[in-house]
Image (spheres, grey):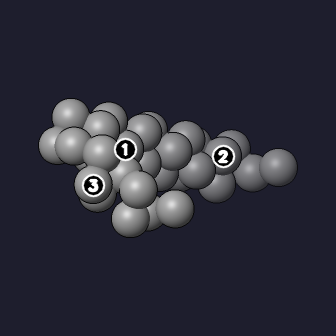
Amino acid sequence: MNLVITFHHFIQKTAYSARYQALEENGTILHTTMY
């Protein structure tokens, strides 16, 4: 596996986690709309 691709995937995963946490803090309405 390429190191650059893995690093890029890690960045995307971290960004997604931060966005997910922000949605959690905003409320469960947006949270339930995602699923």
Dot 1 and dot 2 residues touching (CB under 8 Å): no
Mark 1: which amino acid? Tyr
According to the picture, the residue beneath numbered tag 1 turns out to be 20
Who is closer to the viewer here, 1 or 32?
32
Q: Badge 3, how many Cα within 10 Å: few under 14, some, many 20+?
A: few
* Residue under the point 42% across and 39% down: 17
The percent coordinates of residue 11 (x first, y second) are 46, 44
Secondary structure beneath label 3: helix
Q: Which mark is residue 2?
A: none
Numbered tag placed on residue 6 in the rendering: 2
* 26 lies above or below 30: above
| Mark in the foreground, 2 or 3 | 3
Residue nearest the viewer, comparing 16 with 30 = 30
Name the residue at 17% across, 43% down.
26
Q: Position of 18 compared to 13: left or right? A: left
Tell me which amino acid carries mark 3: Ile
Residue at 42% across, 48% down: 16
Judged from this view, the residue extending furthest toward the right is 1
Q: Which mark is residue 29?
A: 3
Tell me where residue 25 appears, x and y as whole percent.
Answer: 21, 34
Q: Earlier in the sequence, mark 3 or mark 1?
A: 1
3 vs 1, front mark: 3
Count of picture labels: 3
